[in-house]
Image (cartoon, helix red, strand yellow):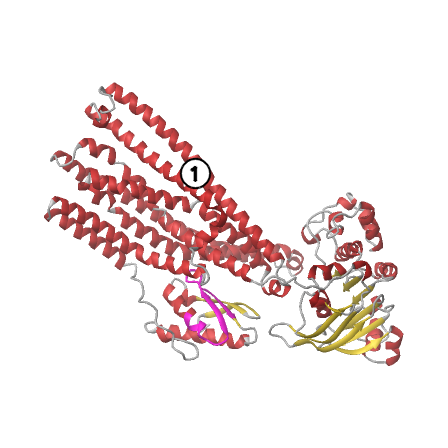
């Protein structure tokens, strides 16, 4: 499109866009989000510079088309003013200027190299102590410059994820009650890193003994001969190896346990919250997105502590041990030993920034490939009927080639980065040997000090190569934490009513008194509707799609609450009753009932878990489900798969009907509960329902009028939730109105 923006999904109150302009441009993404956030009616904007995705949340009363126009206009303005975008906004108001852009990828290495050159010049011309301190200072400054950009981004992300209501860092919020495990894991990691440093020192002393015949530090321990020192060092190396292995095992176990505990804790608490969400909020979120938050995002919270957090601690411990050791023992070579740190840090962060976009593209292409494979396989009958097998195969080839090319590009960058880091560490060791060797030869550095230290910086430098991955995982963790918190911020159903009901005494009279209700962003589904559903009778609701029949059922169950008016059960406003008590009073069967992955008996017993086998069989018989269940090889123990995939639509409806009959509530709502069964089975179910409906209130919602012809009262609904006609089947036929016309069409007496 000309604006460079295309909508990915549009739902009431939320839109997702693909904006190529912000991909790989964090500054542009920030400006676009700020500009759109200033528009009245838009409540939240998130722009991802990695994927180019833009999420816009807005007031549901704002027209989605207007929001789309604003997005396109903002993107067009940004594209037209690439160098002066601080004042860009789709409707005119200026956006506050943001801080100056971070230095580009050319400036950072230049500064690092400049710092190194300055340190080298000072090293040559200054006094010994000054040369050493300034050289090390130059390395520190160069490292700080390299890390500045990522640090600011990290701080901003931390603030955004923490939110305004807490002063604690998000990582502390994530750890929560598991701090003791964190402290144990951290202590073990520090001890392990210390033991590993000691092991490197002992190995250096071993080389010293082999070259010079003794290691001076061991003489003070009483080991005066080379043989004694070698045996002593063998024991120290063995002890250090055992310590490293044991501490590494224990620390990794603790970190993994911490990650698993965090994941389990957050998933349990978040899922419990989701189970108690108001249905209107749960329906407003895509189920796949909620599931992704409960699986991927919660898993990311634990994964960070199971891996990257340990890497950060080990890196910090190495720096804390090695930098003072070199400054105290060998300041002459400290600067060259640690010179690769800013270079490797810059390479790692730069690689991660580039790789993130590549991984996002690869992931998107693989997702499209997987989706197309599944779609084409599920549409096997359609594909074969249109003779498009070759077309689908070619389509998969194209998508696979695109995914393969993205993977190759990512692999080239990853391998190039790894080899560059290896070259830097090798060059560092060579330079350390050269400069340190010259210092040993001219007598300014003792060989006994130089030998044990020479190999230690390499451990630190190799860990530095993980810095980009650590920063990336940290950013991902903060983003996941923010999504989890957003899900947890959705309001749960209030269940604080003080009204009471005794199931044994419920009569089941339901009254809608002047009820008005509208779904967000839509016209009113019900407007000032009043009707009465008598106790102990069968009442039917029929009418065109969109006339509010299912909405009435949702209001009775309090899946939704009325905007005005009242819904009464035996004279009590249902809003005064606890939802749990109300829903125990009402049994509900939806048109597309949900069955769980398990056995048929488990699904019938769902919600009435203590029911006996005899009660389950009786409920199945009443729902006309027993005949087909008895023919299955495993009978009631037959596993039916996810959503009851192993059963037909009619069989699923009969299982759901049996489940509601087993619940034995005084009020029952059947929403197209027999729409998928054949006429013969429906007639048998209707006979059973007449017996089951005795002394209980039953509401039947149906399009098939034969289902409701024996109802005590029939309401014919029209658009806007208006009661167009009411009466018994015979009375409505005598009125020669809309119901009579529908009956004649369905009976075949008139042409449709």
Question: Can you say whether 616 is above or below 553 in the image?
Answer: above
Tally the marks: 1
Look at the image and tell me whether residue 31 can be seen.
yes
Residue at the farthest front position: 498
Foreground pick, 242 / 647 = 242
Q: Where is residue 469? Give x, y as percent.
A: 39, 50
> Can you tell which quarter of the image residue 354 is in?
bottom left
Q: Where is residue 502? Give x, y as percent.
A: 78, 59
Foreground pick, 366 / 731 = 731
**Residue drawn at (54%, 74%) of the image:** 64
Question: Can you say whether 382 is above or below 597 in the image?
Answer: below
Give the magenta-colored segment's residue range. Answer: 34-57
**Residue drawn at (48%, 68%) of the image:** 44
Q: In this view, does 343 lie to the left or right of 41?
A: left
Label 1 SS: helix
Question: Can you say whether 205 is above or below 525 in the image?
Answer: above
> Can you tell which quarter of the image residue 202 is in?
top left
Crowdedness near tag 1: few (<14), some (14–19) or many (≥20) residues, C-alpha within 10 Å? many
Q: In this view, does 30 lie to the left or right of 648?
A: left
């Amino acid at each position: 499109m000309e604006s460079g923006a295309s909508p990915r999904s549009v739902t009431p109150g939320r839109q997702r866009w693909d904006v190529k302009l912000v991909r790989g441009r964090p500054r542009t993404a920030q400006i676009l989000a700020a500009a759109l956030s200033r528009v009245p009616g838009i409540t939240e904007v998130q722009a991802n510079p990695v994927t180019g995705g833009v999420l816009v949340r807005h007031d549901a009363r704002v027209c989605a088309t207007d929001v789309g126009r604003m997005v396109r206009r903002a993107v067009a303005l940004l594209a037209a003013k690439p160098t002066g975008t601080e004042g860009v906004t789709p409707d005119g108001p200026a956006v506050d200027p943001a801080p100056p852009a971070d230095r580009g990828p050319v400036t950072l290495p230049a500064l690092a190299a400049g710092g190194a050159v300055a340190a080298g010049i000072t090293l040559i011309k200054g006094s010994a102590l000054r040369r050493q301190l300034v050289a090390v200072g130059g390395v520190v400054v160069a490292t700080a410059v390299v890390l500045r950009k990522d640090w600011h981004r990290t701080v901003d992300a931390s603030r955004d994820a923490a939110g305004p209501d807490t002063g604690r860092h998000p990582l502390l919020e994530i750890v929560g009650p598991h701090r003791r495990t964190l402290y144990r894991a951290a202590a073990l990691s520090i001890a392990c890193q210390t033991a590993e440093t000691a092991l490197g020192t002992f190995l250096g002393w071993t080389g010293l003994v082999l070259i010079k015949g003794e290691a001076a530090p061991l003489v003070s321990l009483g080991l005066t001969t080379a043989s004694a020192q070698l045996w002593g060092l063998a024991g120290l190396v063995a002890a250090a190896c055992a310590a490293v292995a044991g501490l590494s095992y224990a620390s990794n176990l603790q970190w993994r346990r911490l990650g698993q505990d965090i994941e389990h804790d957050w998933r349990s608490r978040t899922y419990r919250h989701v189970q108690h969400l108001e249905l209107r909020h749960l329906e407003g979120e895509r189920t796949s997105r909620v599931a992704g938050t409960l699986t991927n995002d919660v898993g990311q919270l634990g994964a960070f502590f199971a891996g990257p957090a340990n890497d950060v601690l080990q890196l910090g411990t190495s720096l804390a041990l090695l930098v003072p050791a070199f400054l105290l023992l060998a300041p002459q070579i400290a600067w060259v030993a640690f010179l690769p740190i800013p270079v490797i840090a810059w390479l790692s962060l730069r690689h991660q920034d580039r790789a993130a976009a590549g991984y996002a593209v690869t992931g998107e292409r693989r997702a499209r490939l997987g989706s197309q494979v599944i779609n084409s396989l599920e549409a096997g009958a359609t594909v074969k009927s249109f003779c498009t097998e070759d077309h689908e195969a070619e389509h998969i080839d194209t998508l696979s080639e695109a995914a393969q090319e993205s993977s190759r590009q990512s692999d080239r960058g990853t391998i190039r980065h790894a080899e560059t880091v290896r070259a830097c560490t090798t060059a560092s060791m060579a330079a350390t040997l050269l400069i340190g060797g010259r210092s040993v030869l001219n007598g300014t550095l003792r060989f006994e000090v130089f030998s044990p230290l020479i190999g230690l910086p390499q451990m630190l430098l190799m860990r530095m190569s993980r810095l980009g991955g650590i920063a990336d995982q940290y950013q991902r963790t903060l983003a996941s934490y923010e999504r989890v918190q957003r899900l947890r911020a959705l309001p749960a159903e209030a269940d604080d009513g003080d009204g009471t009901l005794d199931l044994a005494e419920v009569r089941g009279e339901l009254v809608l008194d002047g009820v008005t209700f509208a779904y967000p962003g839509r016209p009113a589904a019900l407007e000032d509707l009043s009707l009465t559903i008598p106790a102990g009778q069968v009442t039917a609701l029929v009418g065109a799609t969109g006339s509010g029949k299912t909405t009435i059922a949702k209001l009775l169950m309090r899946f939704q609450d009325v905007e005005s008016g009242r819904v009464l059960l035996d004279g009590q406003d249902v809003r005064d009753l606890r939802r749990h008590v109300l829903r125990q009073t009402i049994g509900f069967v939806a048109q597309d009932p949900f069955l769980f992955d398990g056995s048929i008996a488990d699904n019938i017993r769902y919600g009435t878990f203590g029911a006996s086998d005899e009660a389950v069989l009786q409920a199945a018989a009443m729902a006309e489900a027993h005949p087909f269940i008895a023919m299955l090889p495993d009978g009631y123990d037959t596993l039916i798969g996810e959503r009851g995939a192993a059963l037909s639509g009619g069989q699923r409806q009969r299982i759901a009907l049996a489940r509601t009959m087993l619940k034995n509530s005084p009020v029952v709502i059947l929403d197209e509960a027999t729409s998928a069964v054949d006429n013969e089975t429906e007639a048998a179910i209707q006979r059973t329902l007449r017996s089951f409906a005795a002394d209980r209130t039953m509401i039947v919602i149906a399009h098939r009028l034969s289902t409701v012809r024996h109802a005590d009262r029939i309401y014919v609904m029209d658009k806007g939730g208006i009661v167009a006609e009411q009466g018994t089947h015979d009375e409505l036929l005598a009125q020669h109105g809309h119901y009579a016309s529908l009956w004649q069409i369905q009976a075949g007496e008139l042409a449709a």
